[in-house]
Structure formats: structure tokens, C-alpha cells
Image (spheres, grey):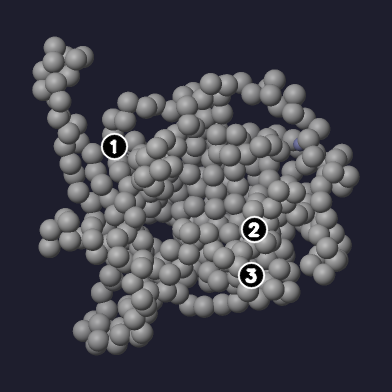
């Protein structure tokens, strides 16, 4: 099969109708995972002005995501270096006393209507969860999780993270209890302006939707199709395969296993996969395992001089199922700087193609010591 055919099939993967339970045949023949890590190396040549116009050839890889068929590129020499970190102390001082600071949060943040949250807001430890003043979904909330206005990327604790994730779980449970159709749950985090955050104060943004966001929908549909065709859960097969290969497998924090994805969506991408179908079935212990792993990734980002990132936790449809495992994805963004260069160019924004300069295998090697 040529590269063109592989490409075409993968592009169609997420859009075909789900075929019902035809996996019996493959189990009779002895089950073999359907996951393939497809990549191809390409060369681009030119006359190089930095070396007397001698011919130079640079190579890059195109990789296909084994679940969705989405492609990404690993380009060792992008010519774009991440800029260093700047001292943010003036900016922190200027922005102190924001809506989310402990002296203002009660007075200046919205409250839920009684039918959803009788108490108005959800409080767990230092975490306070309230409606988003600028909602972009039917159930769109904000969870501020620190009394402190600013926490550097390497200084978050598992306890802070766990309380915030539990507050988000309570929110998801309440929403789903009053609106069964709201079953597409993600928990999200923009950390600092390059990642899209308008406030420095740490806050998560849970979103419980009737209409799933496009990537969440693709992930769920492709996972369902894989389950129907293979009789096993994609995410479990992926973890087993990655653990055996040991090129991108990082380790575990209790029940959560961590990898760097073969075909990344962003720089320094790390993914943690739980053993539970949806976010509301995660036990307190599982949420603790998840929080511990997230903090280890942030400590790794700090060690790599990164100071801005995005995080999303993707849940299976609230209310149950079998084809999905709740998982988290973290990516580093351009560093917070006065004149920073955004890492999301036309390639990402208009062509929907990720380009990274450090391979997932290299990131896996570097992060292992934190686990
Ligand atoms: Zn604040």
C-alpha cells in the first residue's frame, strides 16, 4: 500500500459510519491491535546562503495519529527557537487584586442559579467554582484554585490541583443530574497570556456541552468505531503497545499512565490516561493520581524553562459507555514575554497542522526522571 493510500484511509477513519460488532472474526483469528504508528520522512533541498550557496538538504517527518488520522510534522530545524523566560514580577504586582483573588472572589464573581447549585458556588479546599461571566457553552464555568494571585509553573501542588479537579467533578455531576443531554465534559486550563488566559490568577475552565467541540467529537467517534471493530478499548491497546515499545511511555502515577503521543498536537505534549470511562466516575484516589501526574509534567516544563501551557481533560460521554478512557493532554506554549512570538502560526490556525521541533521520543526521555 502506498503512502497516498494510507493517507486517504486515515482521513476517512473518523467519518465512516460505525460498523456493528464485526470483531468476532478477528478474535477467532487471535486478536491483534489495530494501532499503527505511521510516519514518513521527506527531504527538502536548496542552495544555502550561509554556506557559499552549496546544496543543503533538510529532512522532516509527517506522522499520522493512529486514532484520528490527523497529521503532524516533526521538523528538527524549524528556525524558530522558543524564547527564554522573562521576569514577570512587575506584571504580577500590577495585576494583583483581580476578580479571582480571595478578597474579591465572593463579591465579584457570578453565582449559579439555585436549580443547579443551591449554594451559588462550589467550594473544595482553596478551589472556588462559579459560572463563567463570558460563557461559550451552555454549562461553562471557571474554577479558581488558589488564594495566591500568581503561582509559577513549577510551584503548583498536587493538593491544589486535586481540590480543583474535584470541584470540577462536582460541577459535572450536578449539570448532568439536571440535564441528561449535557454529556460532553472537558476540563481546561490556559496558563498565562500566550496560552489564551486573560488573567494570571490560576483557574480551570470546565465545559459541559450538549454539542461536543469538534476534536472531542472526533476522539469519541473514532474510539467508538475502534471498539466496535476490534472489541477492545483503543486507549488500553495504545497504552499496552506504548509500554511494550518503550519509545514514548513515561510511567504511571497510581492508576494513571503517561505517554508522549506519537503524533502530537503541540510542543512538549504529554498525555495521561486514566482507567475510567467518564470524568464523573473518577474516584477521589484516581483524581489524586491525575493531579500528581499533572504536577510532574508542570515541574518538567519548569525544568525546560517553559512558563505557559494549555491543558484539556477529555471525558467519555457522561452517563457511561465502554469505548473511551478519560484522559488529559498538556502542551507547552510560547513563553510569556513582552514581545513574544506565538507558536500557533497559519499552519496551526488555518491549515490545522501541528509542527514541533522536539520529537515525542526525545520529550519522553527528558521527562522520565520526574515520574
Ligand atoms: Zn488574583
Q: Are marks 3 and 2 in contact (CB under 8 Å)?
A: no
Secondary structure of the residue carrying numbered label 2: loop
Are the two marked residues, 3 and 1, in contact with CB atoms closer than 8 angstroms? no
Q: Is residue 244 visible?
A: no
How far apart marks 2 and 1 lie (CA) works out to 36 Å
The N terminus - image quarter: bottom left
Q: Is residue 183 above or below residue 20?
A: above
Image spot of residue 32 (x, y percent): 25, 74
The residue located at (59%, 52%) in the rendering is 188
Spatial separation of the CA atoms under disc 3 and disc 1: 40 Å
Instruction: Point out which mark residue 58 bears.
Output: none
Which type of secondary structure does the marked residue at label 1 adopt?
A: loop
| Farthest front residue in view | 350
239 versus 87 height, above or below: below
User: Which residue does the numbered mark 2 point to in the structure image?
Assistant: 137
Q: Going 25% across and 82% down the picture, which residue do you hit?
A: 26
Residue count near mark 1 (Cα–Cα under 10 Å), binned few <14, some 14–19, many ≥20: some
Callout in the foreground (2, 1): 2
Left/right of residue 244 with respect to residue 206 in the rendered view: left
Secondary structure beneath disc 3? Answer: loop
**Residue at which label 3 appears:** 182
Q: Are marks 2 and 1 in contact (CB under 8 Å)?
A: no
Is residue 257 rendered to the left or right of residue 166?
left
User: What residue is drawn where x is 48% and y is 31%?
Assistant: 342
Q: Tell me which corner region of the image, top left, top right, bottom left or bottom right, holds residue 323.
A: bottom left
In space, the residues marked 3 and 2 are separated at their CA atoms by 10 Å
Spot the residue most to the top. Answer: 52
- The answer to whether mark 3 is within 8 Å of ligand 1 is no
Q: Can residue 184 be spotted in the picture?
A: yes
Amino acid at each position: 500500500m502506498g503512502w497516498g493510500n494510507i493517507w486517504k484511509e486515515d482521513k476517512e477513519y473518523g467519518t465512516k459510519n460505525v460498523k456493528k460488532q464485526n470483531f468476532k472474526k478477528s478474535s477467532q483469528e487471535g486478536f491483534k491491535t489495530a494501532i499503527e504508528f505511521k510516519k514518513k520522512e521527506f527531504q527538502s533541498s536548496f542552495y544555502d546562503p550561509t554556506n557559499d550557496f552549496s546544496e543543503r538538504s533538510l529532512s522532516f517527518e509527517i506522522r499520522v495519529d493512529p486514532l484520528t488520522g490527523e497529521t503532524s510534522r516533526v521538523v528538527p530545524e524549524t528556525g524558530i527557537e522558543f524564547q527564554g523566560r522573562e521576569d514577570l514580577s512587575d506584571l504580577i504586582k500590577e495585576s494583583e487584586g483581580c476578580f479571582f483573588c480571595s478578597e474579591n472572589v465572593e463579591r465579584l464573581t457570578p453565582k449559579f442559579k439555585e436549580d443547579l447549585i443551591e449554594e451559588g458556588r462550589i467550594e473544595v479546599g482553596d478551589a472556588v467554582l462559579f459560572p463563567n461571566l463570558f460563557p461559550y457553552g451552555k454549562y461553562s464555568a471557571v474554577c479558581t484554585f488558589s488564594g495566591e494571585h500568581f503561582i509559577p509553573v513549577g510551584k503548583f501542588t498536587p493538593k491544589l490541583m486535586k481540590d480543583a479537579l474535584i470541584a470540577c467533578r462536582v460541577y459535572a455531576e450536578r449539570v448532568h443530574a439536571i440535564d441528561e443531554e449535557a454529556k460532553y465534559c472537558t476540563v481546561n486550563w490556559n496558563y498565562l497570556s500566550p496560552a489564551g488566559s486573560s488573567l494570571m490568577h490560576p483557574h480551570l475552565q470546565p465545559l459541559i456541552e450538549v454539542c461536543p467541540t469538534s476534536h472531542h467529537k472526533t476522539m469519541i467517534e473514532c474510539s467508538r468505531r475502534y471498539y466496535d471493530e476490534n472489541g477492545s478499548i483503543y486507549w488500553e491497546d495504545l497504552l499496552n503497545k506504548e509500554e511494550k515499545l518503550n519509545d514514548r511511555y513515561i510511567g504511571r502515577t497510581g492508576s494513571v499512565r503517561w505517554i508522549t503521543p506519537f503524533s502530537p498536537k503541540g510542543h512538549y505534549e504529554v498525555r495521561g490516561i486514566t482507567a475510567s470511562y467518564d470524568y464523573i466516575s473518577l474516584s477521589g484516589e484516581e483524581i489524586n493520581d491525575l493531579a500528581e501526574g499533572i504536577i510532574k509534567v508542570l515541574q518538567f516544563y519548569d525544568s525546560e524553562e517553559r512558563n505557559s501551557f494549555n491543558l484539556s481533560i477529555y471525558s467519555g460521554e457522561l452517563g457511561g459507555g465502554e469505548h473511551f478512557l478519560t484522559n488529559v493532554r498538556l502542551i507547552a506554549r510560547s513563553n510569556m514575554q513582552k514581545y513574544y512570538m506565538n507558536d500557533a502560526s497559519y499552519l496551526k490556525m488555518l491549515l490545522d497542522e501541528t509542527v514541533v521541533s522536539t520529537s515525542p521520543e526525545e520529550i519522553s526521555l527528558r521527562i522520565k526522571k520526574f515520574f
